[in-house]
Image (cartoon, rainbow, N blue to C red):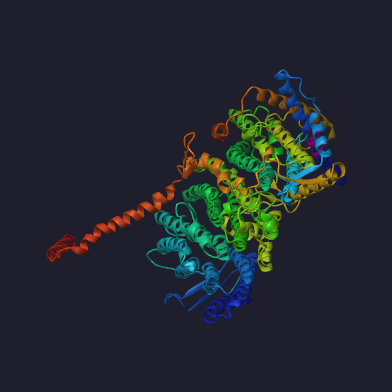
Amino acid sequence: MTAEVAVQFLAQGAQMALVLLIAPLAVGVTRRVKARLMRRQGAPLLQGYRDLAKLLRKESVLAESASWLFRTAPYLIFALTWVAAALVPSFASGLMFNWAADVVALVALLGAARALLALAGMDVGTSFGGIGSSREMMIATLAEPAMMLIVLTLAIAAGTTRLAGVADFFIAEPLAVRVSLALSLVALVIVALAENARIPVDNPMTHLELTMVHEAMVLEYSGRHLALIEAASMLKLTLYLSLLICLFAPFGMAPAAAGPGSWAVGLGAWTAKLLLGAALLGVWEVSIAKMRVFRLPDFLGVAFVFAFIAILLAYLSLGAAA
Amino acid sequence: MVGLYGLGGALGVLAVAAILATLTRSALALVYPLCAGAALVLGAVDLHVLLSDGSLSASLPLGLPTSGLRLRLDPMSAFFGVVINGGVLTASLYGLSLDRQTELTRRVEPLFPIFAAAMNLVLIADDAYGFLFFWELMSLSSWALVAARHTDPESQRASHLYLVMAALGTVSLLFAFGGLAGPAGGYSFEAIRALPPGPAVAALVLAAALVGCGSKGGLVPLHAWLPLAHPAAPSHVSALMSGVMTKVAIYGFMRIAFDLLGPPAWWWALPPIVLGALTAVLGLLYAVLDRDLKRVLAYSTIENVGVIFVALGLALAFKANAFDAAAAVALTAALLHVLNHSWFKSLLFLGAGAVLHATGRRDLDGLGGLIRTMPRTAVLFLVGALSISALPPLNGFVSEWLLFQAVLAGPTLPQASLHFAAPAIGAMLALAAALAAACFVRVYGTAFLGRPRSIDAARAHDVGAAQQVAMGVLALLCILGGLLGGPLAAALGHLVKAIAGGALASGGGPTPLSLVAFGAGRSVYDAPVIALFVAIASVTTLVIVHRVSERRTRRGPAWDCGFPDPSPTTQYTASSFAQPLRRVYGTVVFSARETVIMPPPGDRAPARFSVALVDHAWRIFYAAPARAVLGLAQRLNVLQFLTIRRYLVLMFAALVILLSIAAVTT
């Protein structure tokens, strides 16, 4: 029994280490694909790791008006995002964390990280920090209702809000790809783009002040603090890719009762799918332009409408099954 | 028996405190210690009754001549008693170190114990007469507290509106109890329970109860008085009104809808769910656009009352369909939110009081940088702000999580209107949660973070020890409530079982402290495990980062893209923070219109920017009826200035009409 618990604990620890290790690579893949599609050479795939290492080596410059909250927030934001990322099943669905929080709690953990980041943006008292925080919170109010509807659709289909349970359901019934789930997928992709500050919602590469959201909030950070914030946003991207994989393409994932053997298969499948997802993100980003901030309600409105139609269809299929 | 003596004694102490405060000025210092002691005793008795699932009852030869005054403390009253006395206790603690020499406190202190006692008495009233009498006592004593600053025109307006709305509420509760008692007229709750009314009367009673309790709790569109009245009172009284008195309104609704009205029909659920969801979203939209610290808190109270009404509505729907487990989840969500909201809202109002005391201001655009000048208050207020934004692992999220689980069970309901309402409600609740986070990031970011925007904010200082202890207790409760959601829900098990018929599932989570909604296979939230892992992850990160990274830290001017401006007016203000939200939601809900007057090139006149918002709820539900009443009064005014001949004609016509009616009917 204790050996089993130890294996479970180790597996969970491995998952936490895994998401942390792979996150900079995923961002590297996206950037590389973008660069090649723009016919640039692009940075090496491992540039993400080098950036983090560089930032850690630099001294941190704090604004005179920064308070303790500004210095504490990066650690908490990183930890919250890290734990949230470890909650999403990657290579196996039966890990320990899957019993500790469901997808509602996962969204809320990310919400806590976001609120802390927005507070940190306001802390120094500059206009850029404020503009970033205020827009970030506005975008969140648009994305969260859509996210809630997606969760509701999945709960109707799989009968649970535990991510591992939903994954197990889709592994067991791979043909359950219904229209409502396809619509949910579109909605979740849009929400994920907004949450990760990707094009067309925000441009992660921009340094043109008026178009920035996420970058404006973290403008005052440097050195190790910036490294943590950057690592947290890389983790968040991995988290959303993992979430999409876990919900809509869970094949290869080790089911709840499986042992280390199928974990290896799951690991390979998950890594391949994750990197493919990162590459697709790169393709998407070069093929679309960034939107003006006040066009965003329309864009996220599409996610909301899709998610709502998905629910209605799910009701119909529920009615047909009953 | 000890419990009864405790109740009687504590209420007696409150009466003595009120009398002492009126008689002698030297006794004013005794008011808050006496109130704190009484609240402690009352809370202990309530807690005992709640946990032991017992009840206490007494009958006094007061009140109506035939029946006397019946009092009864059952688990439902006891739960709300715990909530109320927790609030009274911390508000009294906060009051201990208030300056006692001002004219204002001398007007407040005799009324504070009366208000506290009245709320307790509403809970233990066991007949309609006692309920309405104490309800009115509660309304009037809180009205007098709102009017304490009676020379201030804003307070005058607030107290006037509050009085009108309180009267409306009591009148409609009078109708509700009239309907419940029926033609036979048994006004004791026992008699009402024995003979529940038929469906038509039940609908009327439910509507009257929604108006009566909703107006006290701030349900849209009966909310307009609340954001004016709650902030007008001194801050610890605001904490009581917002954190606790709104819960008495919830109690009133629960007592009528879940107890007196008999077994529910499914359609009873619709009005509270729809009104509650509207209230939740609208309350926060008002809050996010307002610039007054205390008024923002009052608007957010409206939102939380809306959330509680949604949970109660869902519980009614599930109970009517005999979905006991789902009803238990929804009801537990409602009760835990009642408890949690009383804690964080009291904390935030006390914090706002501390800010007001230290700076003399409550306009967000005049504050800033308080995290350095009032460090302790800043930490405690942050706990409250994060809790109310429903962020894990704090307490606001526990009830929010349970409520979402209840919404997720909505699709299983057989009634089409209910199961199509479920996704809409879920989306509105998610919107409300996201808006709450935006609202409190805005409040905390402008008031406590950044640079001071006024000399008052720059010179602020932390408040006295008693005030800090009061806020500290509440902040601790917010944290513990977040971690121990599972055991708290289990402690409410008896009460939930008695009302909803089912119980929350337990066990199956990773630790015994997990909160389990329908069974471990379906949904689990284990705050201690999550909090532990977040703590481990942040400490590990801290240690590792400090090992491997460059540890030097330099202080320099803010970067701000190379153009830092030393003037604090260049910071984002509360109004600028709200601008994107105003453009996205305000244009729809408040017909917000922005006008920019830009002088032509060469003209040196300043550019002007103004925003016009229309409060449609006020326009439709308050301004229009008020105009109609005034117009009617003016028409009728003509009757005062007629000639004697016309009066005689009128009297003759009246006589003819009456005689012809008499002739027809006999």
**Left or right side of B205 for A239:** right
Q: Nearer the viewer, residue B327 or A181?
A: A181
**Which quadrant holds the N terminus of chain B?**
bottom right
Residue depicted at x 46% and y 61%? B154
Residue B578 on image: x %, y %: 56, 45
Front in this rendered view, residue B18 or A208: A208
Task: Work out whether residue B321 can be spotted.
Answer: no
Is A230 displayed left or right of A312 in the figure?
right
Viewer-side residue, A263 vs A279? A279
Q: Is residue B240 above or below residue A268?
A: below
The reply to whether the magenta stretch includes residue A163 is no
Left or right: B504 in relation to A96: left
Quarter residue B294 falls in: bottom right
Outermost residue toward the top?
A39
Quadrant of the snapshot with the C terminus of chain B: bottom left
Query: Total number of numbered labels?
Result: 0
Measured from the top left, where is residue B178 in percent x and y? 40, 64
Q: From the image, give the main secondary structure of the stretch colored magenta.
A: helix
Q: Which residues are magenta?
A: A16-22
On whether residue A18 falls in the magenta region, the answer is: yes
x, y (%) of residue B355?
61, 60
x and y, in percent, of residue B213 in the image: 48, 59
Quarter location, residue A92: top right
Relative to B494, is B140 above or below? Answer: below
The answer to whether any part of residue A67 appears in the image is yes
Q: Image point 60% across, 43% down: which residue? A: B408
